Image (cartoon, helix red, strand yellow):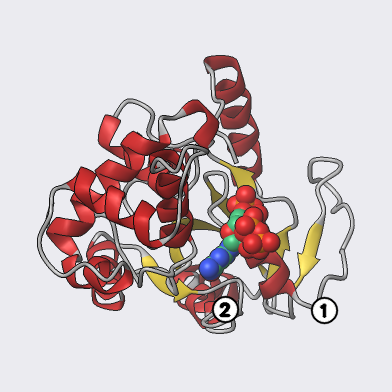
Amino acid sequence: MNFQWYPGHMTKAKRMMQEDIKLIDVVIELVDARIPYSSKNPDIDELAKNKSRIILLNKYDLANEEETKKWRSWYEEKGFFVAMVNSKTGKGVKEVHAVIQAACKEKIERDRRKGILNRPVRAMIVGIPNVGKSTFINSFAGKACAKTGNRPGVTKGKQWIRLNKNVELLDTPGILWPKFEDQAVGQRLAYIGSIKDEILNVTELALGLISFLKKNYSKLLMERFSLEEEMEEVKILEKIAEIRGCRLKGNELDYEKAANLLMDEFRNGRIGRITLEFPES
Ligand code: G4P
């Protein structure tokens, strides 16, 4: 998925989000567990103020487990309800029901005091492109995908998925924009494949990733590519090209091919479970 946000696009998304948020009790924001800061939308805190908030650290199968736990505590300290999920396999997805009930406890109690019993909590999924929103909704809603149709008094065209007697989910996720201004954020989004490689210099990107891995996950890097000693980034890319047989016509090493290969292996988790940013920094 490519990020092609420009001011008009963003204003429209923001307006839609403002409308949708009025209809719901709890905002469930998906972030990528490999970059829980960089994949978080900068404006959602303002847009969703006064709502219950849940953060799902999605794709946690690809992130370092210890770091993901640290991020969970970090967000919990900031007042969010947090869960770690793998939407692709469904791991941790069922547990989100309990998290929703916990996040909406006050609302449920308020309803009860007013004599309103069993009014389902209304939730919506939001997140930047490619973070796994559709995959999560499919996994979470499963077979319970019965649409409840338009609700009286509610914006026309909105479809709700009744998950059970306690929860209704807005069926279309809210697409949010990432933090554009920060270069480091852009680079991490590119590492995980959220920015089209065609508009990037993949060799440079791969060298940047190698530099990060050398510093933070050197054992995984060395094991994956059978490196026996510490080397400079370019030498490592050269070695990857050699051992993976990336060659141009005249038998010269093909650095770009090796760079693409490295990025693919990283994105698919084949180098190991890697988190690209840490709460303490
Ligand atoms: P979006 O709606 O937020 O744009 O994201 P979407 O669900 O389309 O998911 C984007 C990609 O992320 C998909 O991969 C999806 O399979 C993958 N994905 C979603 N959740 C998880 C997860 O928890 N773990 C892992 N490992 N991957 C996840 P894709 O390459 O576009 O398709 P495919 O490989 O599934 O065919």
> On the picture, is 251 further left or further right than 222?
right
- The label shown at residue 93 is 2
Q: Tell me which corner region of the image, top left, top right, bottom left or bottom right, holds residue 270.
A: bottom left
Residue 153, placed above or below residue 105? above
Measuring from the top left, give residue 175's x and y in whole percent.
60, 42
Distance from disc 2 to disc 1, alpha carbons, whole Å, reads 14 Å
Which quarter is ligand 1 in?
bottom right
Mark 1 crowd level (few <14, some 14–19, many ≥20, 10 Å Cα): few
Please give the name of the residue rendered at 78% of the width and 65% of the height, measured from the top-left corner: 161
Measuring from the top left, give residue 281's x and y in whole percent.
13, 51
Residue type marked 1: Lys
Please give the name of the residue rendered at 26% of the width and 66% of the height, measured from the top-left corner: 221
Please give the name of the residue rendered at 27% of the width and 75% of the height, measured from the top-left corner: 69
Residue 13, placed above or below residue 153? above
- The label shown at residue 18 is none
Identify the residue position indicated by label 1 in the image: 143
